[in-house]
Image (cartoon, rainbow, N blue to C red):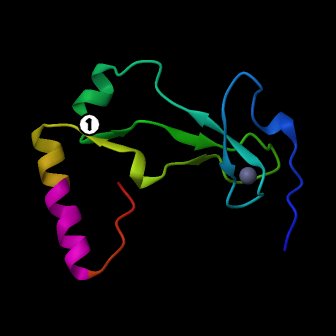
Amino acid sequence: MRTLDIEQDNCNNDKDCGPPCPRCARPMEVRQHSRIREKQRRAAYYYAKWYRCNNTSCRTREVMPPEFIVWNDNPAAQQLRRLKAIYEQLGIEWRGS
Ligand SMILES: [Zn+2]
């Protein structure tokens, strides 16, 4: 079993620590919108929260887990959801767009 070398400075102490980074295994910072603005509402969806790796020597910056997607109720969202359903029928993993 691999032990994780956890360095506290990767996620700010005033913020919640997320899961380990998929690349460097340091805990990621949990980010979320301070409030939902027009930009988020116009999009098909936005992320309720996401993770950010603050390790400057790691190439992973932000991790956007699909389970945090919040769908808006607008034409862009309806179109994208249809596309997502087609992807799923074809067995292709949909990773957002
Ligand atoms: Zn990382």
Q: Is residue 94 magenta?
A: no
Residue closer to the observer: 2 or 33: 2
**Residue kind at label 1, given as amino acid type:** Ala
Main secondary structure of the magenta stretch: helix
* Mark 1 surroundings: few (<14), some (14-19) or many (≥20) residues within 10 A: some
Q: Compared with residue 24, is residue 64 higher up or lower down, i.e. above or below? A: above
| Residue 87, picture quadrant | bottom left
Q: Please, is residue 14 above or below residue 65 in the view?
A: above
**Residue visible at 74% across and 39% down in the picture:** 54
Q: Image quadrant for the C terminus?
A: bottom left
Q: Which residues are magenta?
A: 81-90
Q: Secondary structure at mark 1?
A: loop
Q: Residue at x 18, y 45 (%)?
A: 77
Residue 55 is situated, as x and y percent measured from the top left of the image, at: 79, 44
* Tally of numbered tags: 1
Left or right relative to 85: residue 20: right
Quadrant hosting residue 36:
top left
**Quarter containing the N terminus:** bottom right
User: Going by the image, does 85 lie left or right of 75?
Assistant: right
| Tag 1 residue | 43
Q: Position of residue 28 (x, y in %)?
A: 69, 43
Instruction: Identify the residue shown where x is 32% and y is 29%.
Output: 40
Q: Give the residue drawn at x 59%, y 43%.
A: 51
Q: Residue 4, how many percent across, how many down?
A: 85, 58
- For residue 62, side relative to residue 93 (left or right): right
Indicate whether 44 appears above or below 85.
Answer: above
Whether 38 is drawn above or below 4: the answer is above
